[in-house]
Image (tube, rainbow, N blue to C red):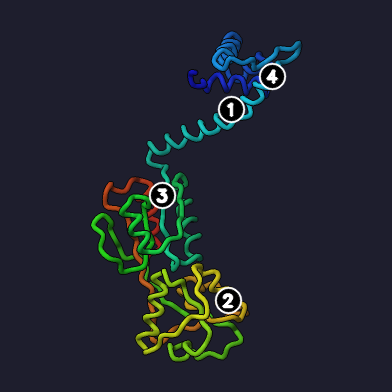
Amino acid sequence: MRNLNLDQLQTLIAIADLGTFAAAAQALHLAPPTVSLHIKELESRLDAVLLVRGRRQAELTPAGEALVQEGRKLLEASDDLVERVRRRAAGKEGLVRIGVSAGVSTRLLPLILEALAARSPGVEVRLDATGSADAMRRLQAGTLDIGIVASPQADVAAVRMEPWRNDAMVVLLPASWEAPSQVTPDWLAARRWASFAPATQMHGLIAAWFGRAGYNPRPFLTLSYPGALKSLAAASQSAAILPLEEVKDERLALGVQIRHLSPPLMRPMALAHRRAPAPGPAVLAVLDVLRSFADS
């Protein structure tokens, strides 16, 4: 069987919506004989009666109803495809897959997406929470376009790295805790604190901070999402070590307090993307927005 003709399908749907062949012809700017020919050819192609002409209007048969119901989806998908191709041809459209490590601020991400929507509304972004090492592997395999990863990473020939941010880490504490002006490994090791999951580079960064002071404490809880870590401090369950960028909105919150770490702990991040093929317009648009959020 030959494929459906979308023009003929559109004619059938117009008749179903408007009730008559004449009204459909007028709405579609077609001659009445052309409308009749569309329906005749469509019925012949499907070997099914789709319409029954009545005195005042045409009525769909059960087969016609089924075709119209699913046909609307086909026409909508067709219109969407045409629009996407036109935008892509003009360099305005594309899907960009971004791997985001656990340490990236959930406060920063909405601001980045908002800026991208304002600058390049035709670019669609798909975020994928993934560890930094996994993001590098997926970039090399071509299943990601950009990775926001912890730095440093092992060199990968197919992937280009560029420094992005170097954010200070702080500790978020329950408001009821009596805490020094700056929190040391010695002070925090004796209390309940939560950390990122062991598979993340952030976990290793925090463990190294304790290790340099001669401590190897076990966290009260490990989680993958910064929001969940913040909620523990707000519920007076434990302290949480997080990037300052992640907790800026908590400065005036009544249930928590923020303390800087001593010695300071920094979280370096990098942008990673494939060298070849060369980034297309959509990937370049996303990279430009991400660079605008880099350290000044």
Q: Tell me the CA gap for discs 2 and 1.
A: 51 Å
Q: Tell me the CA gap for discs 3 and 1.
A: 30 Å
Residue hosting label 1: 71
Q: Tell me the CA gap for discs 2 and 4.
A: 61 Å
Dot 1 or dot 4: first in sequence order is 4
Viewer-nearest of discs 3 and 2: 2
Dot 3 or dot 4: first in sequence order is 4
Q: Amino acid at mark 1?
A: Gly
Q: Does 22 appear above or below 91?
A: above
Dot 2 or dot 4: first in sequence order is 4
Q: Position of residue 73 (x, y in %)?
A: 58, 32
SS of the residue at dot 4?
loop
Residue hosting label 4: 61
Dot 2 or dot 1: first in sequence order is 1
View extreme (top): residue: 33
SS of the residue at dot 2?
helix
Residue hosting label 2: 232
Q: Is residue 187 visible?
A: yes
How crowded pointer 4 is (Cα within 10 Å; few <14, some 14-19, many 20+) is rated as some
Tell me: 280 left or right of 230: left
Q: Amino acid at mark 4?
A: Thr
Q: Does 280 appear above or below 36?
A: below
Viewer-nearest of discs 2 and 4: 4
Residue hosting label 3: 96
SS of the residue at dot 1?
helix
Q: Tell me the CA gap for discs 3 and 4.
A: 44 Å
How crowded pointer 3 is (Cα within 10 Å; few <14, some 14-19, many 20+) is rated as many
Dot 3 or dot 2: first in sequence order is 3
Q: Position of residue 159 (x, y in %)?
A: 28, 56
